[in-house]
Amino acid sequence: MAAAAERKIGLQFEKIEKRYGSVHALRNLNLAIAPGECVALAGRNGSGKTTLLRVASGLTRPTRGSLSFPGLVSDRPPQIGFVAHATMVYDELSAEENLLFFAKLLGVSDRQARVTELLREVGLTERKDSLVRTFSRGMRQRVAIARALLAEPDLLLFDEPATGLDPEATDWLTEHLRKHRDQGCTILMSLHGQSDMARLATRAVRLEAGTVVADTRSSATLQSIFSFAGG
Amino acid sequence: MMPLLSNATAIFGKEVRTEFRSRELLSSTIVFVLIVVVLFSFTLDTNSNESRRFAPGLLWLAFLFASSLMMQPCFLRERTNDTLSALRSSVSDTFAIFLAKIAANALFLLLTELLMLPVFAVMFNVSFVAQFPGILLTFFVGSLGIATAGTAVAAISTQARMRELLLPVLLLPLLAPILVASTEVTVGLMSPDPFMQWKGIGFLAVFDVVFLTALWLFGEYLLEE
Amino acid sequence: MAKRFLFGLVAIALVVGAAYSSLLIAPEERTMGALYRIFFLHVSCAWAGLTAFSICFAANLLYVWKRKEKYDGLGVACAEVGLAFTTVVLITGPIWAKPAWGIYWTWDARLTSTFILWLLYISYLLLRTLVEEADRRALLSALFGIFAFIDVPIVFGAIRWWRTQHPAPVIMGGANSGLDTAMRPTFWLAVLAMHVFMAFLIVERYGLERMRGEVEMLRQEAEG
């Protein structure tokens, strides 16, 4: 994973606006994330966290504004790993088939080796031939994470990744995140409330009604961002 | 170009592999077409020569109706776990997703049609053996057109309400030219003095090219968020 | 306000003038007698309808490219107006056909493509009612409008090649076509009148659509 650490990219949102009809999911959102930072995104439901992450991943086109990746080597598109609410893997395929499929699409070199390595890393080697349909929520999340890591992403985006996970799975996820953070990966994760995962963050940003209302790097105030008027 | 084709092939492989595991789409479609063809045959005297003129039209109508049902899961399936987002972020050109789905849908349609052929032959007392290459070509070009327009419309209807009814309502008028051309060519192949109407095949090919081009130009907007 | 009123007045005056001309000024037709006069209404509406749909197509393309709400408004206005004119075509066609050829309807190139055109734009409007969010609705209907419009010439080609019974086109046909010179002024007056009337209706409908959009926006802002 040494190669990933060298490729540090940041994330810059400039005057981002996203309208769905007359609903402003994001309004005049400005945020600059430095390469290697681990940012926790807090906010109530409907504050724009998911939309922000989807804009960052390129899935949602902003109505206005621009997104850039400082530090990116110009001719390469940024490799982004996105873990959302939905698992984004096929229930009717096995864990290994899913990963091989996406690896092929992404053009990952030496696919089989990479997939085998990832399966081992997320602890699914024994169940690699089972259909994802038979997996528990925690195991599905692991496949989702493995999929996000396939192309050795420069940037990791997590949308409330611990939802529906039991404490054991949550611990595993936290450790995994810590490992990537320590390897220098830029991480932006939306979290619901204080948790062990929030403690990994070096910076916390709070969204409300589609815009940034609080932003801190100080470890003292970091955790309080989550309890700001309503969690 | 290469990434586009290799992406499309990979997705096509996934579609086919998934379908052949459960075979639920194929089997439902085949049964549906069978039922429709049987019902249609109740409306005709299948032994008369006249029925040979009407039969191909009814066959293609049955295929059209089947396609409007068969295309429903195309993008709906990708919504379950939001795998559509995974696809969109993994490919360099969204057209690859469309190409793959069109090819898969065309294949499933073609398989359904070929399986229906013997049933049709028995019901209407026609033999297709001699004309089989011609029939195969017609089915292929026609199914490609149906799959192209169908996939495009499925992408639209998935995002609206009443989508089960909306898909046929949007799709069937668009497919009117295919119905006419395919029927005419099939009639020619089924007549007592069979002949191949190349004009019809050419026409179907034009339809395919036009709609494929339109999808190439506008496809990414269909999947946009 | 005064401009719009004047525009409407001019449009209506032209239509009345064209009607008068069709009914009283144009000469008697050799074989069909008085009934042929409906031809002026039928063809001018057909052309106006096609023009409206062509503008709709352009508006659809512009919306996909520029994403400005006004193109969506123009698109729906043209679709509705085009549909209205096409309905007139589909009604006047059989009225003329029965005495002229003995049958109300036939599946020939022009009639069939007109009917499919009509069905496609009805579907276009139906699609719009089934998508709630304004931006999605605009984008999806624009894309469907594009597919529908490129399909129409193909439909026309298909039917013309394989099943046609429409009399050799009177205006744009081959060697036998040609409107009697005495009828031409009336004909072109009718075409002009219908196009001006079409433009007036589109402008009005577009204005309505803009107003509706503003009201919607105000309502949303008021609600929160």
Image (spheres, coloured by chain):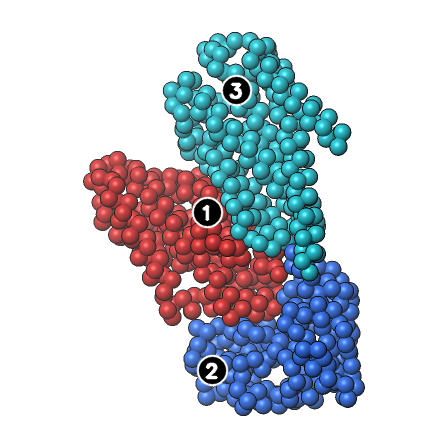
In space, the residues marked 1 and 3 are separated at their CA atoms by 32 Å
Disc 1 secondary structure class: helix
What residue lies at 45% left-to-right and 33% top-to-bottom?
C112
User: Which tint is chain C?
Assistant: cyan
Q: Do labels 3 and 2 share a chain?
A: no
User: Which tint is chain B?
Assistant: red
Q: Are marks 1 and 3 on the same chain?
A: no
Quadrant occupied by the C terminus of chain C = bottom right
Q: How crowded is mark 2: few (under 14 residues within 10 Å), some or many (20 or more)?
A: few
Disc 2 secondary structure class: loop
The subunit letter for the residue under badge 1 reads B
The subunit letter for the residue under badge 3 reads C
At which x and y percent is residue C50?
58, 33
* Nearer to us in this view, C169 or B37: B37
- Residue A212 visible? The answer is yes
User: Which tint is chain A?
Assistant: blue
In space, the residues marked 3 and 2 are separated at their CA atoms by 71 Å
Residue denoted by label 3: C39
Residue sticking out furthest to the left: B47
At which x and y percent is residue B212?
54, 51
At which x and y percent is residue C169?
51, 23
Say which amino acid is labelled 3. Answer: Phe
Residue denoted by label 1: B169
Disc 3 secondary structure class: helix
Say which amino acid is labelled 2. Answer: Ser
Residue C215 vertical placement versus C55 (above, below) = below
What residue lies at 62% left-to-right and 90% top-to-bottom?
A175
